[in-house]
Image (cartoon, helix red, strand yellow):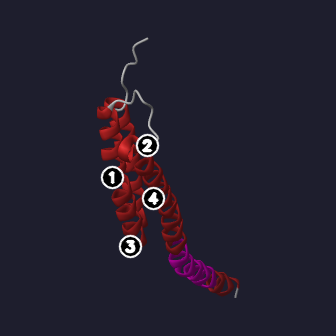
Amino acid sequence: METFADGVFAVAATFTIGIVWVNHHPVMSQIARAATLTYGITPVLMAVLLNALWFYASVGARLLREDHDPKVVRGITRSYRLGLPMYLAATLISIVSPTVGAILFAAIAALYILESSLFGRTKQSS
């Protein structure tokens, strides 16, 4: 009788674990999807606002310093133009695949770090 009870307990535990996993898996994938989507919305909104600010300031040099470097201004403009479509694409992809979306967000961050490190710094003469 004790062996039978152990067997019933083992089957019940297995079913319980299976039920938890079956319920847990879709919930966690939805949370991951929501998390990457929420994360993606943040840089998309930041890109929209920073683009609006930059283009307002830079068109006609209306808010730029008098001694601004046109080459630097063109570089910033080129860099900002890429941000919004890249972040928007990564956000939309994250709806379908949170993992791919997260990888794309990391790649975009790496691109901007590399870009600013290699091309964004100019030496100021004293």
- Circle 4 — which element? helix
* Mark 4 or mark 1, earlier in chain: 4
Q: Are marks 2 and 4 in contact (CB under 8 Å)?
A: no
* Mark 1 or mark 2, earlier in chain: 2
Compared across the picture, whether 46 is left or right of 58 comes to: right
Quadrant of the rendered structure where residue 4 is? bottom right
Q: Residue at x 55, y 80 (%)?
A: 18
Q: Nearer the viewer, mark 3 or mark 2?
A: 2
CA gap, disc 3 to disc 4? 23 Å
Compared across the picture, whether 92 is left or right of 27 comes to: left
Q: Nearer the viewer, mark 2 or mark 4?
A: 2
Task: Give the residue at mark 3.
Answer: 96
The spot of residue 107 in percent (x, y) is: 36, 49
CA gap, disc 2 to disc 4? 19 Å
Q: How many marks?
A: 4
Q: Amino acid at mark 2?
A: Arg
The spot of residue 97 in percent (x, y) is: 39, 69
**What main secondary structure does the magenta stretch of the protein show?**
helix
Q: Is residue 7 above or below residue 118?
A: below
Q: Amino acid at mark 1?
A: Arg
* Mark 3 or mark 2, earlier in chain: 2
Q: Amino acid at mark 3?
A: Val
- Circle 3 — which element? helix
* Mark 2 or mark 4, earlier in chain: 4
